[in-house]
Image (cartoon, rainbow, N blue to C red):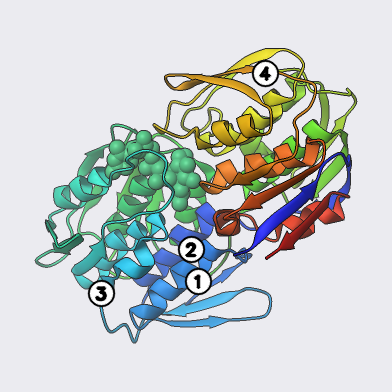
Amino acid sequence: MDKLLIRGGSKLFGEIYASGAKNSALPILAASLLADTPLRVGNLPHLNDVTTMLELLGSMGVDVMLSDEMEVQVDTSNIKNLNARYELVKTMRASILVLGPLLAKFQRATVALPGGCAIGSRPVNLHIDAMRAMGAEISIEDGNIKARVEGRLRGAKIIFEPVSVTATENVIMAASLADGTTIIQNAAREPEVLDLANCLIKMGAKIEGAGTDQIIIQGVENLNGATFSVMPDRVEVGTYLTAAAMTGGKVKIKEAKPEYISSVISKLEQTGATISLGEDWVQIEMNNEKPEAISLTTGPYPSFPTDMQAQFVSLNAIAKGNSTVTETVFENRFMHVQEIARMGGRISLKGNTAVIEGIWSLKGAPVMATDLRASASLVLAGLVANGSTIIDRIYHIDRGYERIEEKLKILGADIERIS
Ligand code: UD1
């Protein structure tokens, strides 16, 4: 099994490109199920989760053609079965995103109950309740969600509590082909929801308000294919900026959309970093020897993203001063804490808050990746630790970071993939 070996201590300097956003690519690929003609999706990142989604579509009989530039053409006209099998779904929760499109287009779907990152219970009740509100009959049989609807799904008023990103996306997709108008209240405002809506609008959908907490979808009878390029990955961009804030140096990220990570940028500025940015690039220069500790609380967009929480725990572990990091989106999303503690980090957990005492430096150690973002935090910790860190189970990182070791090497890090 692959591992990452990191020898800490190098400052990061240079320029890299942001990859396409995983969390935008996955719903957009699922949306291809709604179209009568092929959908072409560009700027897809090379990631295990994207491969899993393509395999999932392929397993249903969907024709997937991949070009060298990672542009994919998805043609659902030969779809044979409407079943998302457990073998694929268990590796990626986001497989639930096929539920809405399958129901809306084919009136039937069987989707295995998902697994994915071990961060709290992560139920799918909001997805199921919303599809029921739109007229679907749903039962849970043998670990599968079995759904069907007589005729078309019907427009409905859906109020989410709590706000959910993929449930909002599932409803937008389902409502695009439903009969009548759907109003989503307390909708997720994440930029990836807006990206999906923009793709659907290009396919012929009638959607207003995406990016706000109320989205109105007027169902149409057919959607066509289109060509769409997915947005840059804001979590990836935030992760490399945080790495530079921890190591020191100067890093520019191109083809990024910094407007989508304002909350992260403002926290990085508070650590002492100088950030400059344009519409599609962002640069960080770390003037201080060490970042200042920074307290934060995660929340749905536009608040500080839960997907950046682990990376900031790492930053605070070696920062000047003490801090608290509070997680409000997921329960049990602090598995990185005990691994960072193995590297000497002084962190204690009080409920959903990590209390962190910044120390001068971490020590390299063998550590274990436990989920996607937790793994990223261990990479960051390894970059600043004294000595060597070996990170095991990096398949978690490969789910969401494209060529992480290559990008960090470009910036001067001493990192390699070993088996
Ligand atoms: C998405 C992102 C993930 C990110 C998360 C929060 C994708 C593919 N994944 O995950 O990277 O960390 O948003 O920004 O876009 N909940 C329920 N019932 C449900 C669904 C969710 O109670 O049916 C709860 C969850 O347990 C959690 C909260 O809602 O506490 C938010 O989760 P949600 O926004 O649904 O996360 P995902 O869409 O799975």
Q: Amino acid at mark 3?
A: Leu
Q: Quick one: which residue is furthest to the top in this view?
A: 321
Q: Earlier in the sequence, mark 2 or mark 3?
A: 3
User: Would you call the spot at circle 1 few (<14 residues within 10 Å), some (14-19), or many (20 or more)?
Assistant: some
In this rendering, the count of numbered labels is: 4
Rendered residue at 44%/58% (across/down): 27
Q: Is residue 184 visible?
A: no
Label 2 and label 3: CA atoms lie apart by 25 Å
Q: Which element is circle 4 on?
A: loop
Quadrant of the rendering where the C terminus is positioned: bottom right
**Which residue position holds label 1?**
226
Rendered residue at 63%/81% (across/down): 67
Q: Which element is circle 2 on?
A: helix
User: Is 351 situated above or below 12?
Assistant: above
**For discs 3 and 1, the disc positioned in front in the rendered view:** 3
Rendered residue at 86%/50% (across/down): 411
**For discs 2 and 3, the disc positioned in front in the rendered view:** 3
User: Would you call the spot at circle 3 few (<14 residues within 10 Å), some (14-19), or many (20 or more)?
Assistant: many
Q: Earlier in the sequence, mark 1 or mark 4?
A: 1
Label 3 and label 4: CA atoms lie apart by 48 Å
Q: Are marks 3 and 1 in contact (CB under 8 Å)?
A: no
Label 1 and label 2: CA atoms lie apart by 6 Å
Q: Is mark 3 within 8 Å of ligand 1?
A: no
**For discs 1 and 4, the disc positioned in front in the rendered view:** 4
Measured from the top left, where is residue 101 in percent x and y? 31, 64
The part of the image, by quadrant, that contains residue 340 is top right
**Which residue position holds label 2?**
202
**Which residue position holds label 4?**
294
Measured from the top left, where is residue 410 in percent x and y? 85, 55
Label 3 and label 1: CA atoms lie apart by 23 Å
Q: Which element is circle 3 on?
A: loop
